[in-house]
């Protein structure tokens, strides 16, 4: 979203058409309304979430390349390399890489049926596993790890899919950073009234696979209070982290390369780790 807004702003200010812009996007879709992601579960039409003009079909000054994840920045040659082996040169580079979902390093976190809630593809995969577990008939249950706003949205999506849903939150209340104790108590009652089970001050100890005699699979989610939940779908909604790995790696280049190859950061990528923050202070300019 931030990358698209940046392109819009640059094109609006470039009345003479001096700039040629290449947008390298990791996903298969042009920029869409990620804030309204949960709305996708109401219609399953990707086009309804697309940001206006994000395909740049009528703008010959902008080239959009989908499924083109950048894996390396070479500041000496002023070029970037994508995962499919293509290299693109630049005069000015902007990183609008956003953030990624944080997945706690719980044993079993990478098992099948475990998901994050971040992209259209994520929601398609969650729906497919929810339908599969309902058809198998072993465990029509879903678990969401994380009781923030995104966790509540994910839990409601599982409920709408027809799954008995549990929210696991390590803090003493839901949305702990947004509401106080009284607000958290009220929110928990509202969520419980929807038929969603809320587990507070509880951590996830492990996630274990269960293989059924018909070949289908479910998960056993073990909690720190001794309980275990058998689930057909699990969603991690435990916060986000900035995708600053490209910025951090580029900072290891030589000072001479850094001086002639400025890199700008935009959006959530600007919330950098300590390593890339040191680099930013000395080598780059950041823009919100």
Image (spheres, helix red, strand yellow):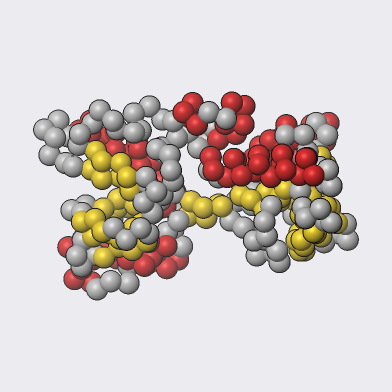
Q: Which of the two residues, 122 or 93, is positioned nearer the viewer here?
A: 122
Residue at point 11%, 33% (across, down): 16
Q: Is residue 231 visible?
A: yes
Specify the quadrant that holds the C terminus.
Answer: top left
In the rendering, at what x and y percent does residue 276 appear? 39, 64
Is residue 150 placed above or below 86 in the rendered structure? above
Q: Which of the two residues, 126 or 99, is positioned nearer the viewer here?
A: 126
Residue at point 30%, 50% (across, down): 94
* Image-based side of 249 in relation to 48, left or right: left
Residue at point 43%, 43% (across, down): 28
Residue 202 image-quadrant placement: bottom right
In the rendering, at what x and y percent does residue 164 appear? 81, 39
In the rendering, at what x and y percent does residue 275 appear? 42, 68
In the rendering, at what x and y percent does residue 54 appear? 35, 33
Specify the quadrant that holds the N terminus.
Answer: top left
Is residue 72 placed above or below 240 in the rendered structure? below
Residue 122 image-quadrant placement: top right
* Image-based side of 226 in relation to 173, left or right: right
Residue at point 20%, 34% (across, down): 60
Q: Which of the two residues, 226 or 46, is positioned nearer the viewer here?
A: 46
* Image-based side of 116 in relation to 207, left or right: left
* Image-based side of 92 in relation to 209, left or right: left
Is residue 165 placed above or below 145 in the rendered structure? above
Q: How many marks?
A: 0
């Amino acid at each position: 979203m931030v990358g698209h807004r940046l392109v819009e702003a640059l094109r609006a200010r470039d009345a003479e058409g001096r700039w040629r812009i290449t947008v390298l996007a990791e996903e298969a879709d042009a920029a869409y309304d990620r804030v309204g992601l949960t709305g996708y579960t109401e219609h399953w039409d990707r086009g309804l979430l697309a940001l206006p003009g994000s395909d740049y079909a009528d703008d010959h000054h902008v080239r959009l390349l989908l499924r083109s994840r950048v894996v390396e920045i070479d500041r000496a040659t002023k070029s970037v390399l994508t995962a499919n082996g293509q290299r693109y040169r630049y005069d000015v580079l902007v990183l609008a890489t956003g953030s990624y979902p944080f997945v706690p390093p719980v044993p079993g976190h990478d098992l099948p049926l475990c998901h994050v809630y971040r992209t259209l593809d994520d929601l398609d995969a969650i729906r497919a596993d929810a339908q599969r577990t309902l058809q198998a008939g072993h465990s029509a249950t879903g678990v969401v790890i994380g009781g923030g706003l995104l966790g509540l949205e994910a839990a409601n999506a599982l409920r709408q899919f027809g799954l008995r849903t549990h929210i696991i939150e390590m803090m003493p209340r839901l949305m702990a950073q947004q509401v106080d104790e009284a607000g958290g108590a009220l929110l928990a009652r509202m969520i419980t009234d929807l038929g969603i089970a809320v587990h507070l001050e509880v951590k996830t100890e492990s996630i274990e696979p269960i293989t059924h005699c018909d070949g289908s699979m479910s998960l056993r989610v073990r909690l720190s209070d001794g309980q275990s939940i058998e689930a057909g779908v699990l969603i991690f909604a435990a916060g986000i982290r900035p995708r600053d790995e490209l910025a951090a790696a580029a900072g290891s280049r030589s000072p001479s390369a850094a001086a002639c190859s400025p890199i700008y950061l935009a959006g959530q990528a600007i919330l950098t780790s300590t390593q890339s923050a040191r680099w930013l202070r000395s080598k780059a300019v950041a823009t919100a």
